Amino acid sequence: MATADLLLHPVRLRILRALLDGRDRTTSDLRGDLPDIAPATLYRHVALLAEAGVLTVVAEQRVRGAVERTYRLPHGSAEVDDDALAAMTPADHRRAFTAFVAGLLADFDRYLDRDDVDPRQDGVGYRQAALWLTDAELDALLAEVRTAVAARLHNPPVPGRVRRLLSTVLMPAGGPPGDDPADGAAG
């Protein structure tokens, strides 16, 4: 598994997002997907991800005397494991969440900068719902969401399919335990 430090760099996050659709890409392909990243920077960060085992080299070919590699993002390789997650400090989580939100904002800005923006037609949404759940109900909800997403995760790109990003945030609301009147512990 990768470390949070490796994955949470803004450029590496964008590279990983570009590869989330399961298609293999060369660094040249990624340059087309991420034209605002300087080529040397892109090559350096792709190499770091490959050296760490986050990206897999699936092909190599000679192009004008240089070796061009084709990369794949294997399912699960860009996830921080439970032990690393548990070892993160609140400051680490704050930094990770900030990187996540910054990437989300950048993705949304790129969407809004297109000429053909139609949020309703495109199924764009951002909502927040407050749910009262026991730990068991939360586990059941998460299992349902994982099942629903997993059933569609490996859909190949075909005519009529649009690559869509699904981003989730789940956290307890309110203050510390006991502050919520529903807990029965407060006034």
Image (cartoon, grey):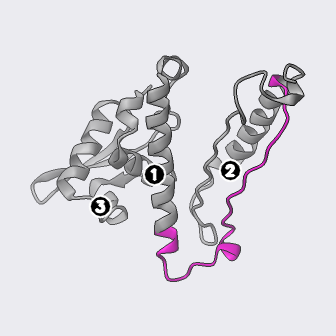
Residue 111, percent across and down?
51, 69
Q: Which mark is residue 30?
A: none
**Image: magenta residue range:** 110-135
Q: Is residue 126 magenta?
A: yes
Dot 1 lies on which element? helix
Identify residue type, mark 2. Arg
Dot 2 lies on which element? helix
Q: Which of the image's four quarters has the C terminus?
A: top right
61 up-or-down from 77: above or below: below
Name the residue at the front extreme: 187
Q: Residues within 10 Å of mark 1 (few under 14, many from 20)?
A: few
First of labels 1, 3 by sequence position: 3
Task: State the residue position of label 1.
Answer: 102
Identify residue type, mark 3. Arg
Task: State the residue position of label 2.
Answer: 152
Residue 27, percent across and down?
28, 54
Residue 113, percent across and down?
47, 75
